[in-house]
Image: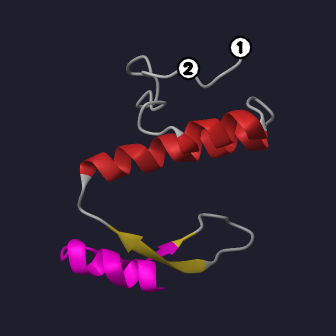
Amino acid sequence: MYTLFELDEHYPDMRICEVETGEPLYPEKHMSVCFNYRLLDEFMQEWNIRKQELAEGKITKEEYADWKLNWPDTADDCGKFQPKKKWRKG
């Protein structure tokens, strides 16, 4: 919570939003932190892709950790450009 409080100090336009999971059989509502900051949205989109790739076995835990530890040099902005640092083995 203290990390979120600190973010609130630096991003005064940060909002707390209620979002639905979109699951038709088990609809749930959760609280979310929303930023009006496009760069963060782009990073979160790429992070979500990496988490999905890990869950699907497309990347290893080591590759995922390397991607996180070396970000932003490993960022490829969802395939729009080449990362500055290679992080995938393949």
Q: Along the horizontal axis of the image, is 81 left or right of 74?
A: left
Examine the rendered structure and indicate whether residue 31 appears above or below residue 41.
below
Q: Which residues are magenta?
A: 1-19
* Amino acid type at mark 2: Lys
Q: Residues within 10 Å of mark 2 (few under 14, many from 20)?
A: some
Is residue 11 shown in magenta? yes
Residue on which disc 1 sits: 90
Seen at 66% across and 43% down, the residue is 65
Q: Which mark is residue 66?
A: none
* Amino acid type at mark 1: Gly
Examine the rendered structure and indicate whether residue 72 appears above or below residue 86.
below
* Residue 15 in view here: no
Q: Residue 15 sits in which quadrant?
A: bottom left
Seen at 56% across and 43% down, the residue is 69
Residue on which disc 2 sits: 86
Question: How was the colour assigned to the protein in this rendering?
Answer: secondary structure
Seen at 27% across and 74% down, the residue is 14
Examine the rendered structure and indicate whether residue 33 appears above or below residue 75.
below
Seen at 19% across and 73% down, the residue is 13
Mark 2 residue element: loop
Total label count?
2
Q: Can you give x and y, in whole percent of width and height, for residue 47 in the image?
A: 53, 45
Q: Can you give x and y, in whole percent of width and height, for residue 16 in the image?
A: 36, 80
- Residues at marks 2 and 1, CA–CA distance in whole angstroms: 10 Å
Q: Residue 66 sits in which quadrant?
A: top right
| Most distant residue in the top direction | 90
**Residue 39 vs residue 74, the one in the foreground:** 74
